[in-house]
Amino acid sequence: MDRLLRGEIPPGGKCDIKTLAGEAAVDRTAFYGTRPYSHLRVEFARRLQALQQAGDIPDPREAQITRLKTENAKLRERLDRSKQTIDELTDFRTQALARLAAQHEVITWLREAAAGKSRVRRLPDPRTKVIGSCS
């Protein structure tokens, strides 16, 4: 029992009653009910639980499983935050494009309104090349 609780797990075993019975060369059923080793099962479970509550997990596989579950939970939280950020940015982009389209409509309307006035002179389109006599 002490070896298992120290983390000396035999190959293919775990820190459990089945492995304890195998290491003691006793039938596993002897640890249950009113059988001769039932008090050892209770003691083993109590000591194992005390170790786990203290943060010490004697079975390296169990420790790895616990670590991976924690890491998985953190990654899921990070993924959820990323999805939320993407949704917020997509909404912002949609609103910005709508505002730009509305501003373009206003500018177009103002240009058309200004074209009808004789006192307003249109500037050349900056996208066209001005051919001048500067050589």
Image (spheres, rainbow, N blue to C red):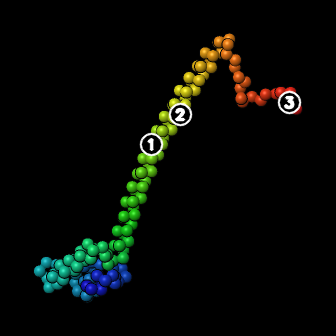
Place of residue 30 in the rendered image (x, y in percent of width and height, measured from the top left):
18, 82
Circles 3 and 2, Cβ within 8 Å, touching? The answer is: no
Residue for badge 2: 97
Picture quadrant of residue 7: bottom left
Q: Secondary structure at mark 3?
A: loop
Closer to the camera, 5 or 34?
5
Quickly name the residue at label 1. 88
Above or below 83: residue 67: below
> In the figure, residue 61 lies in which quadrant?
bottom left
Question: What whole-number distance in Å separates the C-alpha atoms at marks 2 and 1?
Answer: 14 Å
Pointer 2 or 1: first along the chain:
1
Q: Quadrant of the C terminus?
A: top right
Q: Earlier in the sequence, mark 3 or mark 2?
A: 2
Residue drawn at the location 48% of the way across and 41% of the way down: 90
**Relative to 77, is 126 above or below?**
above
Outermost bottom residue: 25
Badge 2 vs badge 1, beta-carbon distance below 8 Å: no
- Say if residue 70 shows up in the picture: yes
Q: Decide: few, some or many residues near mark 3? Use Cα within 10 Å; few <14, some 14-19, many ≥20.
A: few
SS category of the residue bearing label 2: helix
Q: Secondary structure at mark 1?
A: helix
Q: CA distance from mark 1 to mark 3?
A: 52 Å
Q: Which residue is mark 3?
A: 134
> In the rendered structure, which amino acid carries the disc numbered 1?
Glu
Q: Where 39 falls versus 75 (above or below)?
A: below
Please state if 94 lies on the left or on the right of 126 as rendered.
left
User: Quick one: label 1 or label 3, which is nearer the N terminus?
Assistant: 1
**18 vs 94, nearest the viewer:** 94
- For the point 28% across and 82% down, which residue is it? 5
